[in-house]
Amino acid sequence: IVNKEGDFRQAQPEDLDKLVEFSHKFLGAPKDWLAGYINEWIERKEFFFLEKDGDLIGTCETRTTDVNQNVASLGIVVNSNYRKQGYGTYLMQQAKRIAKERNQQVICACDQVNIGSMRAIENCGFRISHPIMNVQF
């Protein structure tokens, strides 16, 4: 795992508000929806974040479903001020490590135009196995 300064930790219920604000700012999703979404992963102990000097650098998730607890779908979000500095790769590596420690198979995906996310995914040893094309008429 690449070394990055900061405090990497599992999210707790008291972190919810700042994680919703962060995710709203960098994803643009509605706050009400984000609150429910993030809270679910906090309760399942599957939401993590990296903070440095009070600045939230990024988040990562190891999402599982009730249908299959043996597979974790990984996700990351990086503060735009910290992109292209290896933080996405760091967060993806942490998520992968946590899932592997939990004896889970790991999967992840991103939109093909999200080059930063794709790089982080590839830097962590993942390869494209099922490309999806979005065809519009």
Image (cartoon, rainbow, N blue to C red):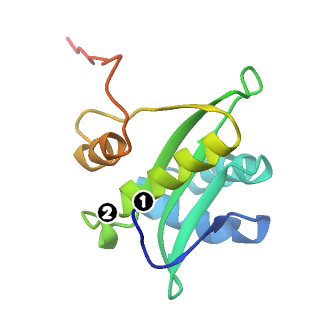
Looking at the rendered structure, the secondary structure element under dot 2 is loop
Image quarter where the N terminus lies is: bottom left
Q: What element carries label 1?
A: helix
Q: Where 96 falls versus 129 (above or below)?
A: below
The answer for how far apart the CA atoms under marks 2 and 1 are is: 6 Å
Q: In which quarter of the image is residue 129?
A: top left
Q: Is residue 111 above or below residue 23?
A: above
Q: Position of residue 83 (x, y in %)?
A: 29, 64
Q: Nearer the viewer, residue 70 or 54?
A: 70
Name the side, left or right, on which 101 lies relative to 76: right
Amino acid marked by disc 2 = Gly
Neighbourhood count class around disc 1 (C-alpha, 10 Å): few under 14, some 14–19, many 20 upward: many
User: Which one is nearer the viewer's eye here, 31 or 62?
Assistant: 62
Query: Which residue is found at the position 35% from the left and 16% from the top?
Result: 130
Q: Residue at x 62, y 42 (%)?
A: 99
Q: Give the residue number, with chain letter if any, for mark 2.
A: 86
Q: Is residue 28 visible?
A: no
Q: Which residue is drawn at 41% across and 32% down?
A: 109
Q: Is residue 21 left or right of residue 104?
A: left
Question: In the rendering, which numbered label is found on residue 90?
Answer: 1
Residues at discs 2 and 1 in contact (Cβ within 8 Å): yes
Q: Which residue lies furthest to the bottom in this view?
A: 53
Q: Quadrant of residue 19?
A: bottom right
Image x and y of residue 118, in percent: 29, 41
Query: Image quadrant for the C terminus?
Result: top left
